[in-house]
Image (cartoon, grey):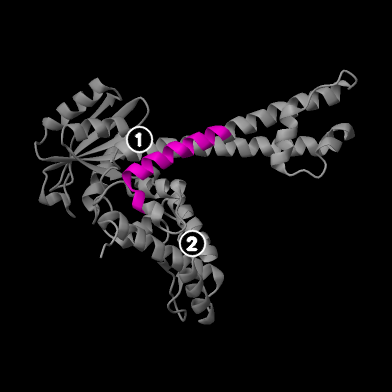
């Protein structure tokens, strides 16, 4: 892995790769002229990756790879290249407006990827595998289980509201957790009509589904906690940070040196203020809606927790309120400070006396 700000200093050719499920398209671009030296499309398989490396070897020994979707469609290729100690640059998928006059094709996107890497002032490296990838998989699976459980609970509540009175009476005055327990145990009576019987069967199915999904989510959280404790237990010592928040932060950060500064980490989290000064309006900033929204949500959760339980943060809230700041502005400032402190902790570890 290298740390440079200009690829022209270290390589002769950049191989841009546009990745898809079944195929990858690549283009070799000369770093001095920006000219295209060659193009190729290969299968997204181990043999295809070998063919792609052979194609790159025909053009230069000193090369770098600009790969789109290193954590998605390009994950297999990225792992193959890293095992071969190739230099890999991580690129995001292009916005449509940034494509050349709206043109879209795999070879064009491969060329654009290579030239974009050459134009960047800072080069990003792919996220690591291992513990980070394990956390990413567990977070995604847990999130799916939580969302599905929430949907089942909503459906359960809606069915109860519209259910026949003999069914509604059993749930009257209960909260959602109690409704789930009641519905999971409810039995069908032979005296009920088809509507009542069908509704009860549906309620029982939804309740058992919601309960099973909640248990699944709890198991995933337990696995997440185990990995976080073995990797970065110092995160769990910070106020407002539990295993899910810690895992979200670690997945975004990945490893030391990937993010070059605390300002870049704040920008990644969508917590860096964006200047909006114009005309007679000075020193104004607007909300940053870009970046990793899961990481932004994690920072927001930390801020809310500290505002409620941390005395230092509550004192900060009182001081900034006295200065005329609104609640939203204070939370945005807090998220920026939290991003700064987390970056320093992740890069350098806890400060010891």
- Res. 272 visible in picture: no
Estimate the x, y position of residue 307 in percent, counting from the top left.
Answer: 52, 65
Work out whether mark 2 precedes mark 1 in sequence or the reverse, and give the earlier one. 1
**In the image, 316: left or right of 7?**
right
- Quarter of the figure with residue 203: top right
Asked if the stretch drawn in magenta spans residue 230, the answer is: yes
Check the image and name the residue furthest to the left: 61
Q: Quadrant of the C terminus?
A: bottom left
Q: Nearer the viewer, mark 2 or mark 1?
A: 2
**In the image, 48: left or right of 333?**
left
At mark 1, the secondary structure is loop
**In the image, 181: left or right of 311?**
right
Q: Residue at x 82, y 23 (%)?
A: 197
- The residue labelled by disc 2 is 303
**In the image, 168: left or right of 204?**
right
Q: Is residue 345 above or below residue 174?
A: below
Estimate the x, y position of residue 66 in percent, counting from the top left.
Answer: 24, 41
Check the image and name the residue furthest to the front: 353
Label 1 crowd bin: few (<14), some (14–19), many (20+), radius 10 Å: few
- Res. 307 visible in picture: yes
Estimate the x, y position of residue 27 in percent, counting from the top left.
Answer: 23, 35
Residues at discs 2 and 1 in contact (Cβ within 8 Å): no
Q: Quadrant of the N terminus?
A: top left
Near-viewer residue (115 or 315):
315
Type of secondary structure dominating the magenta stretch: helix
Near-viewer residue (14 or 123):
123
Near-viewer residue (76 or 246):
246
Q: Magenta residues?
A: 215-234
- The residue labelled by disc 1 is 105
């Amino acid at each position: 892995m290298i740390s440079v700000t200009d690829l022209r200093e270290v390589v002769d050719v950049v191989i841009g790769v546009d990745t898809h499920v079944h195929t990858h398209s690549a283009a070799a671009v000369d770093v001095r002229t920006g000219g295209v030296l060659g193009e190729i499309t290969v299968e997204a398989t181990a043999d295809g990756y070998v063919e792609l490396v052979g194609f790159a070897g025909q053009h230069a020994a000193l090369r770098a790879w600009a790969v789109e979707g290193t954590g998605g469609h390009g994950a297999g290729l990225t792992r193959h290249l890293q095992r071969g100690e190739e230099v890999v640059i991580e690129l995001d998928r292009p916005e449509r407006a940034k494509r050349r006059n709206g043109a879209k094709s795999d070879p064009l996107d491969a060329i654009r990827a290579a030239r974009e890497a050459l134009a960047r002032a800072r080069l990003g490296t792919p996220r690591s595998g291992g513990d980070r990838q394990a956390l990413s998989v567990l977070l995604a699976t847990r999130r799916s289980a939580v969302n599905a459980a929430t949907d089942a609970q909503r459906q359960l509540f809606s069915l109860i509201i519209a259910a026949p009175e003999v069914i509604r009476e059993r749930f009257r005055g209960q909260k959602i957790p109690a409704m789930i327990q009641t519905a999971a145990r409810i039995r069908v009576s032979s005296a009920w009509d088809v509507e009542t019987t069908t509704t009860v069967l549906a309620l029982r199915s939804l309740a058992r589904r919601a309960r099973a999904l909640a248990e699944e989510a709890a198991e995933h959280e337990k696995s997440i906690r185990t990995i976080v404790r073995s990797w970065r237990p110092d995160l769990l010592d910070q106020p407002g940070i539990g295993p899910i928040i810690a895992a979200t932060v670690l997945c975004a950060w990945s490893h030391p040196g990937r993010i070059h500064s605390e300002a870049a980490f704040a920008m990644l989290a969508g917590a860096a203020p964006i200047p909006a000064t114009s005309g007679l309006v000075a020193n104004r900033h607007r909300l940053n809606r870009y970046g990793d929204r899961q990481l932004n949500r994690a920072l927001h959760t930390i801020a809310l927790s500290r505002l409620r339980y941390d005395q230092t943060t509550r004192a900060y809230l009182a001081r900034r309120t006295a200065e005329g700041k609104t609640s939203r502005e204070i939370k945005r400032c807090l998220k920026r400070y939290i991003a700064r402190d987390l970056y320093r902790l992740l890069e350098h570890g806890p400060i010891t006396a």
